[in-house]
Amino acid sequence: MTRTPTAAQRRVIEGADPVTGRLRGTDAQLAALVKRGLAFRHPRPPHDHFLTPAGHRIREAPPEAPPQAPAAEPTPSTGVFAARVGGEEEETLPTGPERLREVRSAWQGLLELRRMTRADGAVDLPCDWERTHLVRAAALTLEAAGHRPAGGGADGYRVRATPQPEAVAVYAPDPRTLAACAASLERAGWQAGEYTEPRTRARYVLASPRRA
């Protein structure tokens, strides 16, 4: 059973790379996290440490509020990459060269995570992180491929969760944009096909990570 981490260990967990889960800390801190089942030491050089699924759950869980403290208003996160799923609420997020660098770095981190979690070191298929963060993974894939998310009047893509296991829906008002998004997902190791909603007749792409 995984034990609750100490305050110092939680700081190490919260400082993990948001995409790869790579950890930075002292040898003692990292060894303690491995012992608690919250991290693992990669067998290949340089033998970095990464969060396990249990460690990811702790990092992503909201911190407990102190007793009688008022609920904090949500604020934009700083220093942590946020995939753009498409929506007006994303209008305030940074754009331009800074955003391009963030997306490029996050995508390279995701490819590295694919490489390090595959026995053959290949990067052509999605990894377990992508299967447990479908919307964020698909949105990062699309933005890294150069597609523009909807929001602020843009007619770009919107990525949404679906009731189907391991599947997301991608919407775009322009059929050419929708087809291009499907092609980009296919190139990144996803299975994608276009469908029509029965009631609204809206076209969308249903995409899921391929396993082989």
Image (cartoon, grey):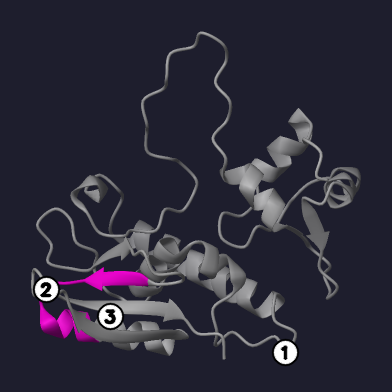
Q: Amino acid at mark 2?
A: Ala
Foreground mark, 3 or 2? Answer: 2
Question: Residue 86 placed where, x, y %?
Answer: 25, 59
Dot 1: element: loop
Residue located 77% across and 37% down the image: 9
Question: Which element type, helix, strand or loop, lies under badge 3?
Answer: helix
Disc 3 residue type?
Cys
Magenta residue check for 175 = yes
* Horizontal side of residue 66 vs 55, given as left or right: left
Determine the secondary structure under disc 2. loop
Tell me the number on the disc at residue 32. none
Q: Are marks 3 and 2 in contact (CB under 8 Å)?
A: no
Residue 7 screen position, x and y as percent? 74, 29
Q: Which residue is mark 2?
A: 202
- Badge 1 amino acid: Asp
Which residues lie in the magenta part?
168-179
The verdict on residue 7 being magenta is no
Q: In the rendered structure, are the residues bearing label 1 and label 2 in contact, judged by CB atoms less than 8 Å apart?
A: no
Q: Which residue is mark 3?
A: 181
